[in-house]
Amino acid sequence: MIDLDIRHQVGEFRLQIALTVGDEVLVLFGASGSGKTTTLQCIAGLQEPQHGHIRLNGEVLFEANGGRKRSVPVHRRRIGYVFQEYALFPHLTVAQNVAFGTRRTPDLPQRVKGMLARMQLADLGSRYPAQLSGGQQQRVAIARALMTEPRALLMDEPFSALDGPVRASLQQDLLAVQRELHLPVIYVTHSLEDAFAVGTRLAVLHEGRLAQVGPCEEVFQRPRTAAVARLMGTRNVFEGRIAEASSRGLSLTWGSLSLAVAPPPEPTPATDRVCFYIRPEDVSVYPPGTAPGATAQETTLAARVAGRVPQGGSTLLLLHVEGHDHSVPPLEVRPSNRLLRSLRLDAGDAVTLGIRPDRVHVIAANGTPT
């Protein structure tokens, strides 16, 4: 198990992160410059934090308490590190690259042969990196990291430069290795598709701090802050204010408009200034002037079509909600194809929108979860 709680500053950038990683693939996710690679380098020993601790299976790898520091050298940490750019030696064969850094023992050639077979490189041991595809080079890099019998594996965007089928194959190989060896794996990526393919849990970094940690699906479906929502690709994230809160729910002010919100499952933010999101598929579209049925319990808004964005099998409508000036981004709505055909909407056409209270999700406006 990896247990870290560190504070580290590089120039103006400050990293403060506390995590435990067990027998799993934890995906470290965030925008460029959020601290993902810095976190990996601190764990590996390539950078030294100013404060905190890093432990692996109970052993202290780094500790800084007051004026006292303790740090285990990189080569003694037994942590595998796989880089995005492979970092293979061009003058060494595949077999020599895989063996590099491993203590020379009589059984080393046999171990290398076994590792090449495990990583689907059995017939490529005598080739040089320049003779390999990108996917094969990354397999060599992973094989080299595993040859040292690491106690943990760190992977920094390892598959981002690979095409889809090769990436999918390597993702499955990684999961098989993790299950077999029961390694804690920290996997850095900026791709949600990548994260969902390999991740047990998702840890979202925002400006050097953990914004949210949880199962991948949970973080995606229930982001706790506006920053996390935007990183998850959530659409229709807006600012608002809580005008009223009761056991029946919230009344949310959105510019000059008011939205009814069902009682949220999480505590509401301590401030009245919040953000909220409405998924495009959760907005109902009606002909102009139409009121939903009495049982719908929807907030109704008047809007006009600002544009249409075809998206393969569906169409995204961009709607300007009346009562807002044009500084407010359009509301994105994804109606059914059948409804679109019946309404025949074009730019400038008026519509009525219906939004159910349980489809408005209130979250913290800043990087602090509710």
Image: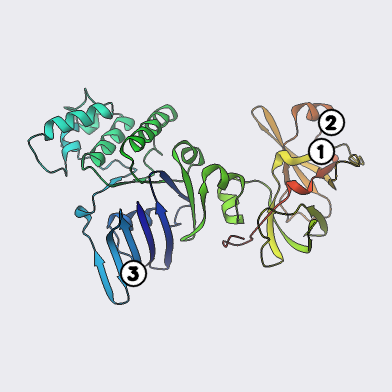
> Which amino acid, mark 1?
Val
Q: Which mark is residue 50?
A: 3
Q: Are marks 2 and 1 in contact (CB under 8 Å)?
A: yes
**Which residue shows up at 23% across the image and 33% down it?**
129
User: In the rendered image, which residue does mark 2 sit on?
Assistant: 343
Foreground mark, 1 or 3?
3
Q: Please indicate whether residue 8 sits to the left or right of residue 100 in the image.
A: right
Foreground mark, 2 or 3?
3
Residue 1 seen by the camera: yes
User: In the rendered image, which residue does mark 1 sit on?
Assistant: 285
> Which amino acid, mark 2?
Leu
| Residue 31 on image: x %, y % | 49, 52
| Residue 86 on image: x %, y % | 29, 40
Distance from label 1 to label 3 (Cα)? 55 Å
Disc 1 is placed on an element classified as: strand
**Which residue shows up at 38% across the image and 64% down it?**
6
Distance from label 2 to label 3 (Cα)? 62 Å
Disc 3 is placed on an element classified as: loop
Distance from label 2 to label 1 (Cα)? 9 Å
Q: Please indicate whether residue 85 sits to the left or right of residue 224 in the image.
A: left
Closer to the chain start, of discs 1 and 3, is 3
Q: Measured along the vertical axis of the image, is residue 111 above or below residue 363? A: above
- Front one among 74 and 178: 178
